[in-house]
Amino acid sequence: MTEHLAAPARGLQVTRLRWRWSRRPLSPEHRRLLWFAASVESLLVAAVILWFQGGRGWGLDAWAYWSVDPVHPYSQTVGSYGAFLYGPPVAQVFAVLGQLPWPVFLVGWTSLLIGVYAWMTGRYALVLLGLFPPAILELINGNIHLLLAAAVALGFRYPWTWTLVLLTKVTPGVGLLWFAVRREWRSLLVALGATALVAGVSFLLAPWMWREWIDLLIAESGKPLAPKAIPIPLMLRLPVAALVVVWGARTDRPWTVAVAAWLAIPAMWWYSSVMLLAVIPIRRWQRAQQGTSTAPDPTVPHPAVVPG
């Protein structure tokens, strides 16, 4: 009888030891090995991506930003090389930055994207480059998805960052339903007011650009999906995105805003999934907030020792 009871007890003890071992932090040697492996994998992924791009090199999307026509920026369509599709305020900013030499602009732009990526992913930055190929492809192409992800994450604290979302990809602004559902009217007003202010100044500087941009958006909305984009129409994804963010707002799941913004992207390229990285800082802040709210206040006596 004792032997039969001892066997499960030994099994339970081994299970506890394994659980404790799995929670043990990595040693410096193992951590360095992991980072080295991730670095090698990242370089291999970058080489494969560049090879599939036909050797066109670094900064495919960044080139469109740098080379934007400062007077008539909307002369090309979605998917064509050098096409610029964002709002006039963004075109006006890049028209100024386009005065820089191309190598200087590319280095500065890539450095900005790397900094944003490192801020969002923290200590997992290098590992994710190897395990999540869209991240390194985004850095190679130089698109703005990482900046949009940062704007979505920061939007909970600084709602004016939604201006970048609304004046570039536009439809990921469905994430603002979070504020409407939760009746956070001040945050919603700040987001929309900041966007209106920037748009108003831009319109005063170049009213014709706004007409051309709206005409472009209308023309592109009736065209088939761009080549190489994920073949799921926006008209199917947008209602799903709205449902996701409404559900998240009602159940206190802020990470759903990042998911909804990604689902609502106008043209869903496979590397646009880097917008999901916004979940990392959102969850980090949420855990910190929950830890702060549950921590005991040292200035308040414990109920057991409150004087009678």
Image: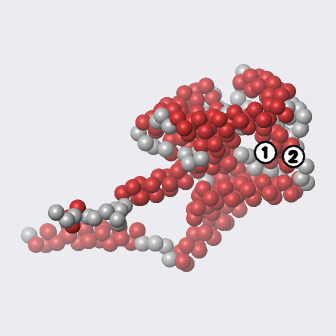
Q: Which residue is mark 1?
A: 61
> Which quarter of the rendering shows the C terminus?
bottom left
On the picture, is 189 further left or further right than 168?
left
Residue sitting at 61 percent across and 39 percent down?
190
Q: How was the colour assigned to the protein in this rendering?
A: secondary structure
Q: 238 or 168: nearer the eye? A: 168
Kind of residue at disc 1: Asp
**Picture layout, residue 26 above or below residue 66:** below
- Residue 15: percent from the left, percent from the top? 30, 67
Residue 199 placement: quadrant: top right
Of circles 2 and 1, the one toward us is 2
Q: How many marks?
A: 2
Q: Is residue 47 visible?
A: no
**Picture layout, residue 17 above or below residue 139:** below
Kind of residue at disc 2: Val
Q: 109 or 306: nearer the eye? A: 306
On the picture, is 141 further left or further right than 127?
right
Q: Residue furthest front?
A: 308
Q: Which residue is mark 2?
A: 96
Residue sitting at 46 percent across and 38 percent down?
248
- Residue 60: percent from the left, percent from the top? 80, 47
Residue sitting at 72 percent across and 21 percent down?
222
- Residue 16: percent from the left, percent from the top? 30, 69
* Callout 1 crowding tier (Cα within 10 Å): few <14, some 14–19, many ≥20: some
SS type, badge 2 = helix
Q: Is residue 72 visible?
A: yes
* Callout 2 crowding tier (Cα within 10 Å): few <14, some 14–19, many ≥20: few
Residue sitting at 57 percent across and 36 percent down?
188
> Which quarter of the rendering shows the N terminus?
bottom left
> CA gap, disc 2 to disc 1?
17 Å
Q: 180 or 214: nearer the eye? A: 180
